[in-house]
Image: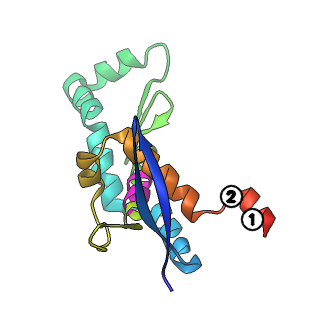
Amino acid sequence: EIKFKTITVTNGEQSFELKVKIPLKKEMEQIINDVSNPSKERVDILYDKFSAGIKKSIDDGGEKFLEAINAEKQVITVLDDDIVFDGTSIRQLANFTAMKELKTEKYFALLKSDISEPVNESYEKITDEFPESLINSIMEEIEKAIKPNYDDVKKN
């Protein structure tokens, strides 16, 4: 039996209710697995997007640019498949971003639409339709609905 829970999302002065499908344990494990392991293609697309500006600067400025920027402190490290900028791996940033996007898609897919169709929107489509603050509120409420908190578990 499919269970739904009603969540209330507040956006500024407005509140509205949404129905969230409560995933079975196996479904939740699949969501966690999918979110934890974004596809290489998805990560690569984000990596290319995040590293484009710095790659262009490196290409335009060449070795002298890297030497100048790294003169006092190692700011940019160019690896075979990554660029580390001020201690932050751009590939790792792309991976975390892919995980966040996937989680948003998977959680929104748990919402029941007005016509009872699953919400299978891409992250881009979701962010086109909703402001980030509202997406974050919806995600937070879905999280509360599908993952029992410690106090609820303790009661049982």
Q: Which residue is mark 1?
A: 153
Q: Residue 149 in the image: x percent, y percent?
A: 68, 58
Q: Is residue 12 above or below residue 42?
A: above
For label 2, the crowd category at 10 Å Cα-Cα, with few meaning under 14, some 14 to 19 and many 20 or more, is: few
| Main secondary structure along the magenta-highlighted residues | helix
149 lies left or right of 49: right
Q: Is residue 104 magenta?
A: yes
Amino acid at pointer 1 = Val
- Which stretch appears magenta? 99-105
Relative depth, front residue between 89 and 112: 112
Q: Secondary structure at mark 2?
A: loop
Q: Is residue 1 magenta?
A: no
Q: Residue 9 in the image: x percent, y percent?
A: 44, 49
For label 1, the crowd category at 10 Å Cα-Cα, with few meaning under 14, some 14 to 19 and many 20 or more, is: few
Amino acid at pointer 2 = Asn
Q: Are marks 2 and 1 in contact (CB under 8 Å)?
A: yes
Q: Is residue 53 above or below residue 153?
A: above
Q: Is residue 96 visible?
A: no
Q: Quadrant of the C terminus?
A: bottom right
Q: Residue furthest bottom?
A: 1
Q: Residue 18 in the image: x percent, y percent?
A: 41, 60
Q: Which residue: 44% across, 43% down?
A: 10
Q: Is residue 111 above or below residue 69?
A: below
Q: Which mark is residue 116?
A: none
Q: Secondary structure at mark 1?
A: helix
Q: Which residue is mark 2?
A: 149
Q: Is residue 61 above or below residue 121?
A: above
Q: Which residue: 32% across, 57% down?
A: 42
Q: Which residue: 50% across, 18% down?
A: 73
